[in-house]
């Protein structure tokens, strides 16, 4: 099975990739990550040389790159961890959160969010632009 993981250099994405490679020996994982403040390839140091893992530095908004990756790899599945995160950052400037977490969601089949989106954080965090943008991304679009 060929999997495209977006945002795989972040904390949750890197743990997912490690889990997938450890528990699914027939999976090949391609990690597409922009390597912003939230992404760090050191999170994946232990699988760097795996023949079942490849890394592509790029943005999910780069349609040419994404289309080329799909043409070349014929992915069976996509798991999206690429998103703006951190509640404090969303309060200072919500625009990047709306762009990354809502406007780009048409390409992806899975969305992942933490406790600020699905409960478990203080009430102020649950009403942040971050939480709102992730919750909106999880809402089906009208046809």
Image (cartoon, rainbow, N blue to C red):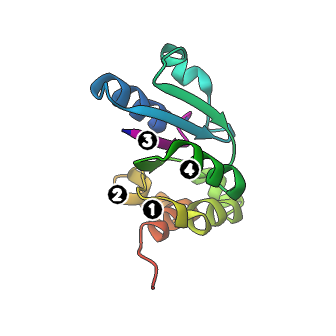
Mark 1 vs 3, N-terminal side: 3
Q: Earlier in the sequence, mark 4 or mark 3?
A: 3
Q: In the image, is residue 7 part of the stretch drawn in magenta?
A: yes
Q: Nearer the viewer, mark 2 or mark 4?
A: 4
Mark sitting earlier along the chain (1/4): 4
Secondary structure of residue under mark 3: strand
Quadrant location of the C terminus in the rendered image: bottom left
**Local secondary structure at mark 2:** loop
The nearer-to-camera label among 4 and 3 is 4
Q: CA distance from mark 1 to mark 4?
A: 35 Å
Q: Are marks 1 and 2 in contact (CB under 8 Å)?
A: yes
Residue identifier under label 3 = 3
Question: Mark 4 — residue?
Answer: 70
Could you say which disc has been placed on residue 100 in the image?
none
Q: Earlier in the sequence, mark 2 or mark 4?
A: 4
Rate crowding at label 4 as few (under 14), some (14 to 19) or many (20 or more) other CA atoms within 10 Å: few
Answer above or below: position of 12 versus 23: below
Which residue is denoted by mark 2 in the rendering? 119
| Circle 1 Cα neighbour tier, 10 Å, few/some/many (<14 / 14–19 / ≥20) | some
- Classify residue 123 as left or right of residue 95: left
Dot 1 or dot 2: first in sequence order is 2
Residue nearest the observer in this picture, 10 or 75: 75
> Percent x, y for residue 64?
71, 55
Give the Cα separation between the discs numbered 2 and 4: 34 Å
Cα–Cα span, label 1 and label 2: 7 Å
Residue 54 image offset from top left, x and y in percent? 56, 28
Q: Which mark is residue 126?
A: 1
User: In this picture, which residue range is highlighted in magenta?
Assistant: 2-9
């Amino acid at each position: 099975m060929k999997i495209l993981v977006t945002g795989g250099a972040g904390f949750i994405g890197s743990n997912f990739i490690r889990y997938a490679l450890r528990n699914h020996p027939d999976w090949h994982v391609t990690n597409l990550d922009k390597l912003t403040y939230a992404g760090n390839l050191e999170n994946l140091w232990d699988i760097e040389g795996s023949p079942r893992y490849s890394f592509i530095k790029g943005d999910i908004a780069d349609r040419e790159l994404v289309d080329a990756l799909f043409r070349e790899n014929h992915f069976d599945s996509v798991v999206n961890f690429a998103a703006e995160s951190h509640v404090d950052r969303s309060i200072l400037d919500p625009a990047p959160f709306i762009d990354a977490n809502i406007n780009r969601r048409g390409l992806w089949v899975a969305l992942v969010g933490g406790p600020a989106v699905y409960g478990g954080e203080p009430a102020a965090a649950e009403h942040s632009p971050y939480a709102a943008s992730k919750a909106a991304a999880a809402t089906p679009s009208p046809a």
